[in-house]
Structure formats: C-alpha cells, structure tokens
Amino acid sequence: MDIYVILLLDVINGASSLFLICLGLAIIFGMMKIINLAHGEFIMLGAYATVISANNGVNIWIAMLVVAPLFVGLVGLVIERCLIRFLYGRLVDSMLATWGLSLLIIGIVTTIFGNTIQGVPTPLGGFSIGAYRSSYYTLFLLLMAVLMMAAIYVVMRYTRLGLIARATMQNPGMANTLGVNPSTVYMGTFAAGAAVTGLAGGLLAPVSGITPVMGGAYVAKAFITVVGGGAAILSGTLSSASLFGALNQVGAYLTTPVFGEVIVFTAAIILIRLLPQGISGRFFKGNL
Amino acid sequence: MTQRLALFTQALAVVVAAVAIAIAPGMIEIFTLMQITLFASMAVLSLSLAFIWGFGGILSFGQTAFFGLGGYAYAVAAINFQDSTQAIMLAVIVPALFSAILGYFAFYGRISDVYLGVITLTVTLILFNVINSTSGDEYRIGEAMLGGFNGIPAVPTFNMPFDPESPLSPEQSWWATAGTLLLVYLGLRALLASPFGRVIVAVRENEVRASLLGYDPRVVKLMTFILGGAIAGLAGALYVNWGAFVGPTIFSLSLSAEIIIWITVGGLGTLLGPIIGCILIEYIVAGIGSQQTLNSNLVLGSVLVFFVLLIPKGIVPTIRDIATGLLARIGRGHGDATPATMPQTAGVK
Amino acid sequence: MAELTPLLRTEHLTMRFGGVVANDDINFTLQEMELRCLIGPNGAGKSTFFKSLTGQQTPTSGTIAFRGLPITGRLPHEIARMGIGIKTQVPNVFNGLTVRENIWLSARRKTTSQSLSAAVRGVLDLIRLTPQADRTVATLSHGQRQWVEIGMVLAAEPHLILLDEPAAGMTDEETLLTADIIRDINLSRAIVVVEHDMAFIRLIAKTVTVFHQGRVLIEDTVDKVLADQRVRDVYLGKKVAA
C-alpha cells in the first residue's frame, strides 16, 4: 500500500518538475515559434547562480527564488539583444544560434568554474510513509508548479501585458498593425522565458549534481514535452507535462529510469503522428 | 561551352582526388595518415546530413543517432561474426531501418521543421542515455557486451571482404575510408543529377507544388531520410574501424552539434562545402584537444554563432558568389552590377 | 436513359472555417471538354472551392466526384495523378530551379523518356519561354512566372485544368496571349478559370458560374450573366466600390 503512495508522490514530483523545467521553453516556443536549444544551459546557469550565491552566504530561498531567475533573465535579455534579434524571420538560423550559444555557455562556465562545484543540501528535510522515505521538498516543487501556473494564468488573462502576448501568439502580423512593437514583445518574451527557466534551475539545484553539462539531463524530456504539448503555453505544457511526467515515473518504476524516458519518447512520437500540432493544437485551440 | 568546361574541370578534380588518395600513404607519416583517415570517416557523416538537409530540406539535428547505431551495429556484428563484411552491411541496414521508422512518424505526421529538428535531437539524447545504462552482463548481444559507459573495446577492424584472416593495414584502411568518401560523394552527385534527385530538390523548393504535380512529398522525404541514415551508418562503421572502439559518446550532443557546424561553416546546399567544413573543424578540434587553455565547446559555440550571424551561407557558396561576381565583372570589362543569380540553396530555410 | 457521367460533379460541397462558411452547399457540374469561368467578388469562395477540388483541404461535408470516382478528401498528389492540374492564385513554382527543370518535373510523370525532352520543348514553345529556358525561375518577371506555372500544369497533361487568375499581373499583350492559349488547351481538355478581368472573361467564356458569399448565385451563358442585375450588384458594384 505504502509503495503506491510513494509512487503517487513520485508521479506528482515528476509531473511538477517537468512542468517547471518546460515552462520557460514553452513560453519562448509559444510566442516566437522557436525552440531555444540553449534551454538546458539556462537551467544550468540558474543552478550555478543559486549554488554560488548560497555558498557565499545568501539565504538559500532567496538564492533559488530571486537570484536565479533575475540572473538568468538578465542573461536572456542580453542574448536576445546581441544575437536573437538579428535572426527574426529565420527560424532555423535562430535555433542554430541558440545551439551555438549552448556550447558557448558550457565552455564559459567550464573555463571559469571547472568541471564540477560544491552543491547545496536539500532544504526542508523528509518524512516517512511506512518503510519509505520522501522529502518535503517534493511537495514544495508541486506548490511552486501550481504557483507558477496561477501566476502565468493571471498575467496572461488579466493584464495588458498578457493581452499583448496573447494577441502576438494568435496573429503576430495583426498585433503589429495594432501598434504593438514585435521587437519589444520578443525581447520581453525571451527574457521572461529565460527567467522562468532560471527559476527552474534554481529549484533543481538542491536535488541535482551541479556540472556545466547538467542541462543535457533535462533537455530531452523538456523538448519532447513542449513538442507534444504544442504551441499553447499553459494548457499544452500542463497537459503534456502531466501525461509524460506520469508515464516517465510509472515507466521508470516498472523498468529503469532510462527506459522510462524511452517510453515517454515513444509515446511522444506516436502522439505527434496522430496530433501533428501537439495536444493543445487539437484540444485547446486558441487557449493560453 | 562553359558547361563542358565545368564538367571537364570536375572530372579532372575527381581524378586528382583519386590519385591523391592513392599516393597519400607514401607521402605522409603514419600518425597523420591515421588522423586523415578519421577525418575522412567524419566527412562521410557530414555528407549524409549535407544531402538530407541541403538538398532534401530535412532538418535533422540528430544525425549522430544513425552514425552511432551504425557504429554499434558494426561493433556487435564484427565481434559476433569475426568478419567485417556482414558487419559493414548491418551498419548500413540497422540505421536505415531505424530512420525508416522514425521518418515514417515524422513525415506522415507532417510535422514542421522545428519539430523534426527537436525530435531527431531528442532521439540522440535518449540513445545516449540508453547505451550509457547498458553496463552489466545482462546487456549483451551474442558475444558482444554493450558495456554501458565504458563502451565496447577491441572491436575487430576491417578485413578483406569475406576473408577474416586478412585484416586491413592502416594504409589499406585509409584507402577504404577515403575511397568510400569519394564514392559516396560521386554517388550523391549522380543521384542529384538523376530524375529522382531533381524530385528531391523540387520537394524542398515547394512541397505544395510538388504534390499538385502528383509527387508524394512524404515518400520522397522518407526515401531521402533513409538514404541519409544509411550513409551515416556507413560512416559509423568507418569510424569504429578507425578506433577499434565504440562508446556512448558517439551519440553525444557535442558531436551532433559538430555535424551541424561542419555544414553551416562549409555551406548548406553543397556537397563539397560540408566535406571542407568537416575537415577544417575537426582539425581545429584536434588542435584544441592537445592543449589546456581553450575549451572546445567555447570555440565550437563561437564558430557556430559567428557563421550564423555573419556568414550564414557558409564558406563554399560565399566564395562561389564572390568568384561569380568577379568573373562577371571581368567578362563585362566594367564594374557595373550584374544581377546575382539565385543560389541553389534558396528556399531551404 | 443513361445520363452521361460528368467530368466533375460536386454535391452539397461545404467548407467551414470556424464560424465562417467559405463554401455553402455547392452543386457544380462540369462536362468533358467544357470551358467554364468562375467569377465572384473577393471572398466569394472561389479559391476555397479549388482547394477542395485539388485535395489541399478536406471539405467539411459534401462530395466531389471526378468522372464518377469519389475524390473527396484524397491527398493532393493522388488527385493530381488522376488528372486534375491547378495553377494556384499566387505563383506556385520551384523558384530555385530553372524554367526547363520546372517543366521537366511535371512532364516526366506522364511521358516516356524518349519523348520527354520533345514534350518539354513543346511546352516551352507554347508558353513563349524557350529563350529563358535555362534561367532560374526566381529571376523571371511575375507574368513570366505565371507562364511557367501554366506550362507545368500543361506538361502534366491533365484531363481537367483549374486556372486561378491566370492573367493576374500580366500586360495587355500577355493577357491576349493567355486567352489564346486557354482556347487552344480547351480543344483537347476541360478547363475551369477563375478570373476578375471582365474583358478577359468575354474573350474566352462560354458558360459562367457566379459565386457569391460561398454559394452559386447564377450559372448561365456569358452574355446573360453579365447582363444580370444581381451579378452587377454583387460583383461589378463591389469591384467599383473596391
């Protein structure tokens, strides 16, 4: 019996961390229709920002929730201004540029900090269910996922900014003619996506090995989740993160974590054969 | 007239290349020969993506998946059969089958470029993780232990066809590898000049028009993709033959990136450019590997960003454009501008 | 009495995009060797109709039959192979290839290799582009690109040719030539032409079908249609207003 409670916790954990990891990627994809191939490195930067500031005496919660998103958001802003904005209208080139960026960031971080640095301990401690142990941090990740979801929903639904964003998602050409400057929208989008990704990196820092190539461990799942979810930021990411997160954990429980990933990938391939526009392209057309 | 001249020049270049391949072992040291053997096997991989991306318009970010599968198929088969002949065949067949399955889902689902790039990249990442996790006795295929993170050491290298007792010397390996490169290059040139080759380019240029003329773009793209997978698999066999070793890093993200860089640097929409780009970049990477101050990721990333921003066409098309412009100037005797002809890569992106 | 199977027949053909009804219950019949003009103001559903006929979209409801065979919802390449060729509204050619290669790609599906180059030459002559045969299509003028596309459609030797605004953007001289060619093609094939230019319609038309707001408004001889008050109201009136 206890094992099922733990499994349920694992599924919740899998789905909520997947949601957090994907959200920034989905924001950039939903608005700009490009996949940011430096996504894994944004996560890594968030984790580094958290770990380094925490190791230098900053409160761990501030390091995770404030420093990481601010720092990575700033990095995203600089990257958009110096690189991405020259490649508008060249989808493939912008993806190639973010790939180059991904290597560049890994190279820079390796040069500065070497191949690994001291991590931070997981805050909040743990609890027991029968013979099994779990940590409160798992529940905290769920809470954060729910909070992020609510925050994005409120911003998109009830603010002027959100209205502009939704208009751009629906019809970029039309949004231009209404006096929305696409350059500003894309700049804001990229920075916001980076900040959200940085937050995810910060949140994962206590539960991950901190290395310059740590992003590689997350991107495969993030990419297929966003592709499977389609262009709608919230509904798409939420539905595919839940689906794939659950599949991944159950698959991992029944086989091995690696084959859990294979199962998710196979499911994603079949999904896009049936729904080429992703889940949201079929079921949540025009939604957030 | 000019066409004949061009054809003659090209035929001459092929003869020169063949002669150079033949006499190279006598001219250079064994260490250099080994190194250019490696470059030649990589160049075959480069051609596989140059073909499907540059001519088929298929954006595959994970060509290493087929390269790696080819390498592993070769290694497993060579250990089991103790004869490289069947192993090389399997190195072509296994990735071709895998690309057929993957391509079916991708092209019949009519997914976009962006999705295809991401999915092929993801396949590579997952294969890396899968192979990485295969350490232990239970992961064996016949005699071959997959070995997980440590890979498969002591893979039998190429032998004379159907004659396992006669392994190839390093010189013969060079001839086999470089000869394969030349043959793949010529084969692709011939294919692209053939009716099917023109249909491939037509689908890249305008999928809707091609289908309104009665061509099924899904079939054409699938065929192109499978051929690319097969060539990448062959390159994998050549690569494993070079090192007598295969490990999961053959699926690594950085190698996937390198292939993309070879083509971006050399020039999308050409076959020669990606070969040049490959050799150039691999030469630089080898140089970086032997010293400590510069990180290869740093250099590769900078090169990719630099080319995408400033020389998006790549080296070969850029030089060709400049040369064409100069010739036109000389031909006219004046510096008046001539309308630039549309490059063959138009409409790829 | 057995009725002759028409070349093309649509029954209750309807196409909706969300709340917009682009084609509403269209019953359209075309006989072998017929030349038909489709006219109607912008947004009347003419191009949508063509897209359903060629498989570029699947109609919401209704059926399409080509020589009695149902083709509703078939894929574009399947329909093209059955013998329906289309020149789309926006020039839809292989910009990176030469004129000859464009024609060749179309011709080779129908013609054996012996007669292939002759067939390509014939089409090049017909569309007056022999001197430009080895130029890249992207370097041609808009009018010439239209010709290339018409040439591609012809080279495939279809049984039915759909031309969506074949004379758009052409000079007067080119327009007259286009009319000549259309009449020539009609000696051996059925054609449906969508066109805005009334003078052009008068040059070629026998029977005219008028689309309005996704429905067939009237179908009659060219003189009767152009004299019809409703047609003047919806079509000519709008054109003046626009």
Image (spheres, helix red, strand yellow):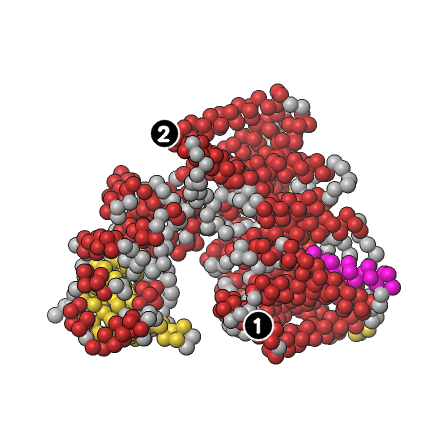
Which residue is found at the position 68% from the left and 70% from the top?
A: A16
Q: Is residue B314 magenta?
A: no
- Let me know if residue A26 appears in the view: no
Q: Is residue C61 above or below residue C125?
A: below
Circle 1 marks a residue in which chain?
A
Name the residue at the top extreme: B26
Residue nearest the observer in this picture, C174 or C32 = C174
Residue nearest the observer in this picture, A277 or A108 = A108
In the image, residue A133 lies at what x, y percent? Answer: 80, 70
Residue nearest the observer in this picture, B136 or B72 = B72
| Quarter containing the C terminus of chain C | bottom left
What segment carries the magenta color?
A40-57
Mark number, residue B1: 2
Q: Is residue A220 above or below residue B235?
A: below
Quarter of the rendering containing residue B340: top left
Mark number, residue C218: none
Q: Is residue B54 above or below residue B283?
A: below
| Left-right relation of A259 to C49 | right
